[in-house]
Image (cartoon, rainbow, N blue to C red):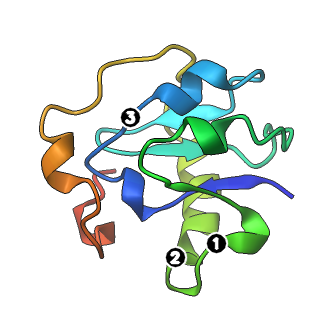
Amino acid sequence: MTFVVGQNCIRCKDTDCVEVCPVDCFYEGPNFLVINPDECIDCEDCVPACPEDAIYAEDDVPDDQKAFIELNAELAEIWPNISEKKDRLPDADKWSGVADKLKYLER
């Protein structure tokens, strides 16, 4: 089983999860992070580190976010790796908790 970044990360992109990842399996897009499922070692360290509650075990991804399983795998192949914490996006507080954010994902 791997972990998946869901929609709550979009337009927030808090990188506390990146800082605790022992294998650097996060990849960064303009306004979202993803986990490479082939690199994730299922350690769960990222889950409690995410202030947006945006990371799920693959088996626990909410039904309305199942597309994010494939999206994480797809985007991890094209986005650059991120291994150090960065500041969250400037307007992250405004977007925290907003539903249905997939339409705001920038590739």
Q: Amino acid at mark 3?
A: Asp
- Quarter of the rendering containing residue 67: bottom right
Horizontal and vertical percent position of residue 100: 30, 76
Dots 2, 3 in contact, CB < 8 A: no
Dots 1, 3 in contact, CB < 8 A: no
Query: Label 3 belongs to which residue?
Result: 14
Residue 86 lies left or right of residue 95; in this view the side is right
Query: Label 2 belongs to which residue?
Result: 65
Query: Label 1 belongs to which residue?
Result: 61
Q: Provide the secondary structure element on which disc 1 rests.
A: loop
Viewer-proximal residue among 73 and 11: 11
Taking the view exactly as shown, the residue that stands out farthest to the bottom is 63
- Please give the name of the residue rendered at 71% of the width and 72% of the height, measured from the top-left corner: 60
Dots 2, 1 in contact, CB < 8 A: yes
CA gap, disc 1 and disc 3: 19 Å
Q: Provide the secondary structure element on which disc 2 rests.
A: helix
Quarter occupied by the N terminus: bottom right
Horizontal and vertical percent position of residue 51: 44, 42
- Quarter of the rendering containing residue 103: bottom left
**Which one is in front in this view, the residue at disc 2 or the one at disc 3?**
3
Mark found first going from the N terminus, 1 or 3: 3
Horizontal and vertical percent position of residue 59: 78, 72
- Please give the name of the residue rendered at 20% of the width and 54% of the height, measured from the top-left corner: 95
Q: Amino acid at mark 2?
A: Gln
- Classify 10 Å Cα crowding around label 2: few (below 14), some (14-19), many (20 and above): some
Q: Amino acid at mark 1?
A: Val
- Classify 10 Å Cα crowding around label 3: few (below 14), some (14-19), many (20 and above): many
Residue 95 lies left or right of residue 20; in this view the side is left
